[in-house]
Image (cartoon, rainbow, N blue to C red):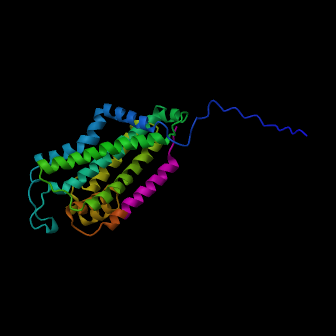
Amino acid sequence: MSTTTSTPPRKAASSHAPAHRGGMPGLGRLISTEFRVFNRDYGNLFFVVAFPTVLLLGMGLAIPGMDQRLEDAGPWTGLQVIDLMVPTMVCVAIATAGLSSFPTYLATYREKGVLRRLSTTPMAPQGILVALASVNLFWLAIGSVAAVAIAVVFLDVPLPVDWGLLLLTLPLAIGSVFGIGLILGGVMRKAAAASGIGMLIYFPLLFFAGLWTPGPIMPEMLRTIATWMPLGGASQAMTTAWFGVGDFPTEQFISMALWTVLTFAVAVKVFRWK
């Protein structure tokens, strides 16, 4: 007895279907390309990498009294005023990358249709987020290390006392600010709008980080508000790590963690690829 089996014809693959949607093939090449694009933008490169160093040197060398040692200032006695500004300059580097560069590039890619075109390639659109974040985090690290190193050499500021606490603080500080940048870059149709709103958020956050009034001499009410702001909590936690003054910054860590979780959750909800 013969048995005849029939195999249903296979459905032809659509020419419009992406070849692969599960991973990120070509991610290394995309990151390399983003590095080249970023490096050609000299204005952006200056503000992310060099601006914190220029600002810190300018304050330390040009503003009278910044090199004066504090007297009768409790745990801060013996420190220079400029010493207290160093954690704030790390916050400046984080804010410049997270609220200016990152969202502006992301909105630019949406405005120019790059994200839409990526959706028709084997590269998952999330790859552009990874590439942009990698480039910005790399130059953010270079800018922060350069600012601290030059300040140590030319302004005689001290190195951090508690490196462990500092390294715990940095990821949360970066996450809380980049989460805001991801929301901006995720919804703005135009790069100019993302940049403009980013700047509106940038300066108030730097105020609470102590750019105009260093954290230790900030009025108590402002200091309490700053604890629950992304860069305010980060600056306070980094100050504790830098000078070894005060208890473990529990409230500041809770604040940064909440900002990170909430902003990334909102960004996932509102993000638009087109």
Looking at the rendering, the stretch of residues picked out in magenta corresponds to 254-274
Magenta region, main secondary structure: helix
Instruction: Name which residue lies at 27% across and 53% down.
Output: 207
Task: Residue 239: name its quadrant.
Answer: bottom left
Is residue 196 at all visible to an observer of this figure? no
Q: Position of residue 30 (x, y in %)?
A: 43, 35
Task: Residue 213: name its quadrant.
Answer: bottom left
Q: Position of residue 74 (x, y in %)?
A: 14, 69
Name, please, the residue furthest toward the right. 1
Name, please, the residue furthest toward the front. 1
Q: Position of residue 42 (x, y in %)?
A: 28, 33
Is residue 122 at all visible to an observer of this figure? yes
Q: Position of residue 3 (x, y in %)?
A: 87, 39
Instruction: Judge from the rendering whether residue 78 lies leftward or rightward of residue 47; answer left or right.
Output: left
In this rendering, the answer to whether 192 lies above or below 216 is: above
**Depth check: 110 or 10 in front?**
10
**Depth check: 172 or 189 in front?**
172
In this rendering, the answer to whether 68 lies above or below 122 is: below
Q: Is residue 32 magenta?
A: no
Total numbered labels placed on residues in the image? 0
Task: Residue 233: name its quadrant.
Answer: bottom left
Q: Quadrant of the N terminus?
A: top right
